[in-house]
Image: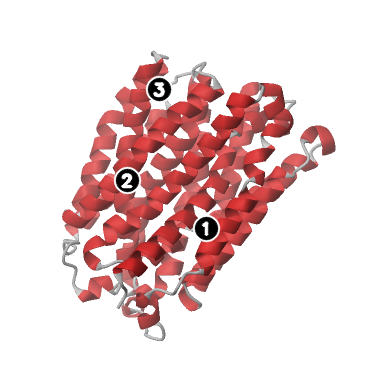
Amino acid sequence: MTTPAEVRRTTLAASIGNTVETYDYAVYGFLATVLAKVFFPAASTGTALLSSFAVFGSAFLARPAGALVFGPVADRLGRRPALVASLLLMAGASTLIGLLPTTAMIGIAAPILLVLLRFAQGLAAGGEFTTAIIYVAEFAPPHRRGALSSRVQVGSLAGFLLGAVVVLSLTAVLTPAQMATWGWRVPFLLALPIGVIGLYLRSRFGETPEFLAARGRPSPGDAAPDGQWARVFLLVGVSVLHIVGIYMVYTYVQSYLIQLRLSAFTATSVIVFALLAGVFFVVAGGRASDRKDRPKVLLASSLVVLVVTYPLFAVLAGAPPLWLIVVCTVLLSAGPAFYSGVAPITYVQLIPVQRRGSVVGISYNVTVGVLGGSAVFICQALVELTGDRRSPAYLLLAAAAASAAAAFGLVRRREPAPSTPPASVEAGS
């Protein structure tokens, strides 16, 4: 029997480890406008930014491959080895980006190497998030699985927040020329000491009770592959708003605000406010998922995003006063953040224990590969093609509609209430 103290330690360690990896992964997004000038100096401003976002997206294309590697490791060897290995790869790739020569130094080889290192980051991320939520959910008591699993998403937002604060601090003390010359390297080089901290925490992990109990038993999904595929499709549908909402609001919107003539310092400060509020909404979503029917909470959250997204972008597009920009950005993040507090435990409970690492990892990361990196690129492309600053709203609306349909599908399945799940559900049947 797992003790409450052990649950707290392992949950905290998994969440902090995810913070480390998300920081390494997200720093690139916050430095996109600077990196566009460093690695694509000959292009126009808009084209260079699109190129920078394309490199950002290259890491997402690697995530399914990462899931193919780390998912089976998590299912065969254990959750802990997969989490340690993914952290080592992420910290190493991020440190090397900080040491990378620029285009002015080695020409076209610089952006090529940048793409390769971003690909390595994507491989690591493909084994990180889903394994972490599986790890926490399998340690947590049934009546708190939603709340405790949501802490991994809190860890992700904390990683975004840490990256934003580091970039914000550098922007405040360095000139634009210094940022372009050497300042952009600092956040990536910090990946090494931060990674050492995360590695220490993860080296103290134990294995989850559910994994140990299920080892050697056949998966219930082997007898009903059609039902397994239905669960995979539902998992993918639920993940759409989670992925697009988080990456769009907390990565793209910073560059969007800079294009509204805010300084990099001010735009990043606005994102910091949104991230702080987002932590609150993620926690609220996780707790709500333990008290209410999860599919209905997902459906309600999706519908809220559908209602508020376009009006909020319409206000932002008019370049309103700063206080109103802060309010709109926080409100824009509220729905996706609340939703992302409910989604993680939903993924875990859809798939049997013996296959969770592989099926959840591959399903989620294929969706991330298609939508995560492309979200920021598509948003910028919509603005460039249409000249309409409200156009990014359409992508978030489409994501909310897709996830609302998936949540409705879960409601129609009449899954048991999460507060009193039967043993078969908790075993992943």
248 to 4, vertically: above or below: above
**Whole-number angstrom distance, CA of label 3 to CA of label 2:** 26 Å
* Disc 2 secondary structure class: helix
Give left or right: position of 89 versus 17: right
On the rendered image, what quadrant is the N terminus found in?
Answer: bottom left
Q: Which residue is mark 2?
A: 282
Q: Position of residue 397 (x, y in %)?
A: 34, 35
**Sequence-first disc among 1 and 2:** 1
The residue located at (48%, 42%) in the rendering is: 160
Q: Which residue is mark 3?
A: 390
Q: Are marks 3 and 1 in contact (CB under 8 Å)?
A: no
The residue located at (39%, 40%) in the rendering is: 245
* Disc 3 secondary structure class: loop
Q: Position of residue 402 (x, y in %)?
A: 32, 45
**Sequence-first disc among 3 and 1:** 1
Q: Which mark is residue 126?
A: 1
Which residue type carries mark 2?
Answer: Val
Pick the front one: 74 or 137: 137
Does any portion of residue 68 appear in the rendered image?
A: no
Which residue type carries mark 1?
Answer: Gly
Kindly give the residue lying farthest to the right in the view shown.
106
